Image (tube, rainbow, N blue to C red):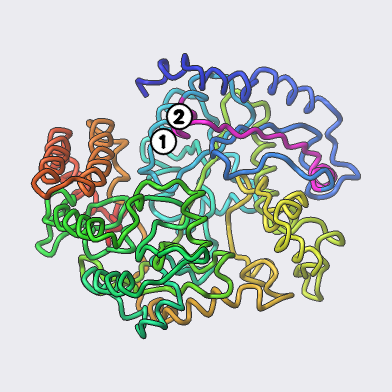
Amino acid sequence: MKRWSKLLITPIVAALLLAGCSGNGNNEQASAGNSKDNSSAGKPETWIADRTIKGLVFMDSDIDTEMNPEIAAELKKKTGITLEMQAVQGGDSTELLAAGIASGDLPDFIAYYLDNSGRPEMAVILKAAAEGMFADLTPLFKDTKIYSKYLEEGYLPKDTKYGSMFRPEFNGSSYLAHMNILRQPGYTVRKYVAGPFIRKDIAEALKIDPREIRTTEQFYELAKKIKAGGFKDKNGKDVYPIGPDYHGGREDSSLYADLVWGENDQLIKRGADGKILHESQTEYPMKRVAYMQKLLNEKLMDPEFFTMEETRATEGALNGSYAIIGMHNYMDFNKDEHYLPMGPMNTTNGPYQMMIPYKTAYGAWSIPATTEHPEEVVKFADFLASREGKLLWQYGIEGRDYTLDDKGNPIVKQEVLDVVKNDPDQGKKLGFELAGNTWGSPLGSTDKDPLVDFGEMIYGDSVNPELNAAPERMAEYWGWDKLRSNARLVDGYRPLSFLSVFAKGEQLQAALDNYKDSMIRAYYTKSLDEAKKIVDSASAQLNAAGLDEYLTLIDQKDKDVKTKLIMQ
């Protein structure tokens, strides 16, 4: 927060504020729009007001802001609303959010990333809410059909309710709407398998069952066999046994989960003795460094495993340049199942156990206090979150993109499915989410239950069951159903969710980030002694930043039923 004024004078933020925000103009236009005859006489039940609603989206390129003209016209006919959005890109999303809010010049709503209350965006939103910069959403939710569910006991997950939206210090008020809430607890939209996958032809040539590879030692022995096998990619070049994640280089703990203390993005969990520890306080950092150095030195892992940009990593996966990569079972390039899932890998607790969230959340939106008639923005969000609204922004236009069966569920037209599959860019121009355009997601993606709402779990299943048959077969092969039957249903907070209320939170966050960067640097050192110096220095910085105090804090939080921790 102390960096806000500094950020505002940088060229990138200056460009952001000039290009992305025109708050006073927005409010004047919105006010002018609301001065029109907004009588609902002769209008559909979904009518809200004849006005323009403008939004600013701090979610990089994940949200599309251009609307198909026919979709926009249908939205206008149903609600009276003209939606205009701009996406802010070109820098760290949290810093851009902070700068945008600090400008005090915002449109009718803003949308931003927020997986949980531990994300850095939360601190930005809390400060702005405390300074009266956002409208209170609680009274505005009461007369809605969908968002009123947020006020019902048990509808929201604990972290959303107590950590993000209805925090104790707000006394019942809420200044953000957490999104992508599932309607039913423990609901699973897809049988999702993420982690290491191996080229099927290589597994068959070596006569190994990928599902039996459960430990890093087995993983290492397999990598040696792959290297000795002389396998080639599509271009006739030698493959690397282990390559980066399909989406680019990063720390991918799913490939070596038994050497990572807790979840990869948290690195905090309770040990067998009952004490909560950060990974730096265990033997695992140096164990993992030794393992990585062995893989790198023996050329079993691509040297750019942790750093490769996405385009090159994806190209390598498409060419089969890596025997083993990190990916998931719904990737289009693998519909022929030439990569098969491995494991799942054991963890530091022992054999893998699936964790199913009570409910999940992702993304959020807020309404600036300067917005004219904020109740109309909430009503608009409520329409988009309704079944009728979702039909429009997820499925498109009846007659053009789908027909309805005798139960009122959409039957996607085959020609539309063909366009989406064969020409994604053209499909996106159709203007709805399931064809690739996500304009409705920031305000409408919540209360999710596609099977009940639309008669299918995944877009197009009712027309073409084979469309997603391959991912289902891979999940079956991996043993998803059995693992799901033994899963833990969890509801609570991630260990790092309380950094925003920790006195040294900013300092500790910097030290945590440095620790992760230091681990990657340690992998590439020439000796374990040199690596240990780097790890020890990063650990010392964590201690100086108040790590032990923070672990004591979250241990106390875990004793309260409202702030229970979710730990691996």
Q: Would you name the residue on which mark 1 appears?
A: 170
- Vertical arrangement, residue 217 with respect to residue 81, above or below: below
Q: Quadrant of residue 469?
A: bottom right
From the viewer's side, name the closer residue of 509 and 334.
334
Q: Amino acid at mark 2?
A: Ala
From the viewer's side, name the closer residue of 374 and 525.
525
Q: Amino acid at mark 1?
A: Phe
| 10 Å crowding of disc 2: few (<14), some (14-19), many (20+) | many
- Residue 176 left/right relative to 220: right
Residue sitting farthest toward the front: 236
Q: Secondary structure at mark 1?
A: helix
Residue appearing at x 71%, y 33% in the figure: 53
Q: Which mark is residue 129?
A: 2
Q: Position of residue 183 (x, y in %)?
A: 55, 62
Residue appearing at x 81%, y 39% in the figure: 80
Residue sitting farthest toward the right: 42
Instruction: For the C terminus, give its image quadrant.
Output: bottom left
Mark 1–mark 2 distance (CA, rounded to whole Å):
9 Å
| 10 Å crowding of disc 1: few (<14), some (14-19), many (20+) | some
Q: Are the two marked residues, 1 and 2, in contact with CB atoms closer than 8 angstroms?
A: yes
Q: Tell me which segment is drawn in magenta.
A: 71-98
- Residue 201 left/right relative to 296: right
- Vertical arrangement, residue 122 with respect to residue 317, above or below: above
- Vertical arrangement, residue 179 with respect to residue 186, above or below: above
- Residue 517 left/right relative to 422: left
Q: Secondary structure at mark 2?
A: helix
Residue 437 in sight in this render: yes
Point out the frontmost of discs 1 and 2.
2
Residue 153 in sight in this render: no
Q: Position of residue 408 (x, y in %)?
A: 78, 70
Residue appearing at x 83%, y 67% in the figure: 403
